[in-house]
Image (cartoon, grey):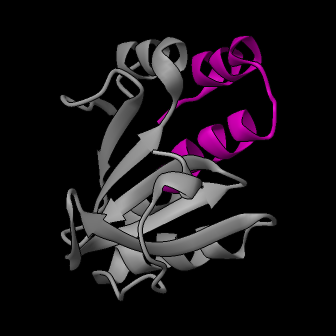
């Protein structure tokens, strides 16, 4: 969803320990706008934190610590095939990564960096090269 289509603004909520580390890091990246992620269709229920570059969502973190990272369909296929994230069942343009341990933080930030760079104009072709070279 585009930032211009989002509802009211509220700062991002506190998240579980390791997801909070990711949230704070993302919010510090140049040009990233962080805000509350509302439960779909209900702006009274907080469901996590959203992150945007300009009007484009790069992903969000849910209250339980699951990251949904915007990759677009082409990049998603490559990331999932490399087993670097799971497919998001509701959209072919996102991947899923659980942030449950300290060791999950670095990988979540790597995934978000793909989305961030994509939003900044880096091509899917170049990002797929990164995916191919990445070792977990």
Coordinates of residue 11 in the picture (x, y in percent):
49, 86
Q: Which span of residues is magenta-colored?
A: 108-136
The part of the image, by quadrant, that contains residue 36 is bottom left
Whether residue 67 is situated above or below residue 75 in the rendered picture: below
Towards the viewer: 93 or 136: 93
Q: Taken as a whole, is the magenta stretch helix, strand or loop?
A: helix
Coordinates of residue 30 in the picture (x, y in percent):
81, 66
* Residue in view at x 77 percent, y 19 percent: 123
Q: Is residue 101 visible?
A: no
Is 21 on the left or on the right of 19, as rendered? Answer: right
Coordinates of residue 10 in the picture (x, y in percent):
45, 85
* Residue in view at x 21 percent, y 56 percent: 40
Towards the viewer: 102 or 121: 121
Is 55 on the left or on the right of 71, as rendered? Answer: right
The quadrant in which the N terminus is found is top left
Whether residue 57 is situated above or below residue 29 in the rendered picture: above
Q: How many marks?
A: 0
The part of the image, by quadrant, that contains residue 89 is top left
Towards the viewer: 135 or 1: 1
Coordinates of residue 6 in the picture (x, y in percent):
45, 60
The part of the image, by quadrant, that contains residue 15 is bottom left
Magenta segment: does it hold 129?
yes
* Residue in view at x 69 percent, y 15 percent: 129
Whether residue 80 is situated above or below residue 86 in the rendered picture: above
Is 100 on the left or on the right of 11, as rendered? Answer: left
Magenta segment: does it hold 99?
no
Q: Is residue 59 visible?
A: yes
* Residue in view at x 52 percent, y 11 percent: 74
Towards the viewer: 43 or 69: 43
């Amino acid at each position: 969803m585009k930032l211009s289509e989002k509802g009211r603004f509220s700062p991002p909520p506190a998240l579980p320990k390791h997801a909070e580390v990711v949230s704070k890091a993302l919010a510090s990246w140049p040009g990233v706008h962080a805000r509350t992620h509302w439960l779909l269709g209900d702006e009274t229920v907080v469901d996590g934190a959203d992150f945007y570059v300009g009007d484009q969502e790069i992903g969000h973190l849910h209250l339980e610590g699951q990251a949904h990272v915007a990759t677009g369909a082409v990049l998603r296929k490559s990331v999932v095939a490399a087993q670097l994230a799971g497919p998001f069942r509701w959209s072919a343009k996102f991947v899923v990564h659980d942030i449950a341990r300290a060791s999950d933080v670095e990988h979540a930030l790597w995934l978000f960096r793909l989305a961030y760079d994509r939003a900044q104009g880096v091509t899917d072709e170049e990002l797929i090269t990164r995916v191919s070279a990445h070792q977990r």
